[in-house]
Image (cartoon, helix red, strand yellow):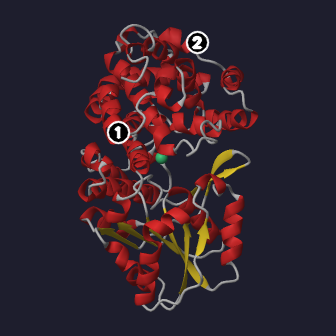
Amino acid sequence: MSELIEQALQTATDTKDIVTGSGVVDRAGEVFVKNFPGKRAIIVADENTWAAAGEAVQKSLTDAGVEQEEPFIFPGTPTLYAGYENVTTVREHLKPLDAVACSVASGTLNDLTKLASGELGRPYMNVCTAASMDGYAAFGASITRDGFKITRNCPAPAALVADLDVMGAAPKRLTATGYGDLIEKIPGGADWLVADELGVEAVDDYVWNLVQPGLRDALADPEGCAAGEPEAIGRLAEGLLMSGLAMQAHQSSRPASGAGHNFSHQWEMEGHGLDWEPPLSHGNKVGIGTVASCALYEKVLELDIDSVDLDAAVAAWPDPDANDARVEALQDIPAIREAALQQSRGKYVEPSQIRERVEQIKQHWPAIIQRVREQLITAEEAASLLKRVGAPYHPEMIGIDQDKLKKTYFQAQTIRSRYTMFDTLQELGIFGDVVESLFQPGGYWHEHPTPQ
Ligand SMILES: [Zn+2]
């Protein structure tokens, strides 16, 4: 285990143990005994994850003297069991058993087991089968309910076993999706710096340092990740695990999610790609959101802040009703509209305060630019990294055309109360113009109308 993970575990509220490395699946039993002494185990898997590591985990538990229930194995297609009803299925199965769940899983199945165990007030552990998302060590579970992805609070796993050989042998698209989830921490970090500089939400240095210093290294070898090389997978997996531990320490997704993630959340809530086979993944959408966010930041870096007219920005600032109307007009789906209204009100600046805010932005602008410039990569670089890992790198590749992409910039600003550069531009009264410029000659999306 790396020193970083070791350090992060000391402040983690739920997770006590993470074992990573090649061949460590054989230590699942030892980890179980250490964390749940005297307890019986039940493996929760699906047909795919069982094939990847199920028998090895079962043998390891047996060798460690752990008594086990019959494994609970879902069919192989995640679309069949991604809904909340299957949290109930797992929970009701576990309920009469005096056993701790050991899931052999990545995204969906880990979340099902996490939430089912959480609802029973029981701890659980997970054996990671793919470097496919940053939620392993995170609290909370993303579950689909009535067609919407919702996040439910529940504790993170007590222990994780991340065997790099198992994760490296996972389908490439799963690694590519984890890479997409991780790369957003670059512009997402910039968003946090902006919020910090403006005094909206301070950067927590401890949590920042769990994610950001190792990020470039974790993303450095996209070809190695695509080839399933244990060293590259190890660094990617560590980046993903550290993001989860950072969220656990911060009790929020701020350390791992900025405006780029909001593109994904918007499309997710609309159900975009949910009925594809396989369904369009979180990380694939987040990767495209990353390119979109980096493209916007390129325009930000070129911006002449002195040309922003303070009086015009103040005069154009919507009152609360007008701001609600703006949000409502952007969201056609009632449930998203309601959520977006709540979130947008949460960060709305009162008309009596807007002059002060805009003055503050103008005053802090050189510092903002200096800090985000050091943090950012270009949209071109982000797209290139995604391409090399085998992930979609252009919106067209995930069925998003330019009109929809443009609209999503505006929608993405509405769906989270979390402050990002999108809000700064909105407050300056130039968000629309800056987004528009991305689609004009010289703008990233004008120059990249199709995947290249
Ligand atoms: Zn994510």
Q: In which quarter of the image is residue 287?
A: top left
Q: Which of marks 1 and 2 is in front?
A: 1
Q: Give me the disc on residue 316.
A: 2
Counting from the top left corner in percent of width and height, residue 115 is at 61, 64
Q: Judge left or right: residue 445 versus residue 321.
A: left
The residue lying at 50 percent from left, 92 percent from top is 38
Q: Judge left or right: residue 82 versus residue 360.
A: right
The local crowd at label 2, few if under 14, some if 14 to 19, many if 20 or more residues have their Cα within 10 Å, is: few
Q: What residue type is labelled 2?
A: Ala
99, 312: nearer the viewer: 99
Counting from the top left corner in percent of width and height, residue 268 is at 60, 40
Q: Judge left or right: residue 400 versus residue 92.
A: left
283, 413: nearer the viewer: 283
The local crowd at label 1, few if under 14, some if 14 to 19, many if 20 or more residues have their Cα within 10 Å, is: many
The residue lying at 72 percent from left, 36 percent from top is 338
Q: Judge left or right: residue 92 versus residue 180.
A: right
Q: Give me the disc on residue 394.
A: none
The residue indicated by pointer 1 is 186
The residue lying at 39 percent from left, 20 percent from top is 362
412, 273: nearer the viewer: 273
The quadrant in which the N terminus is found is bottom left
294, 80: nearer the viewer: 80
Q: What element carries label 2?
A: helix
Q: Are marks 1 and 2 in contact (CB under 8 Å)?
A: no
Asked if 236 appears above or below 332 in the picture, the reply is below
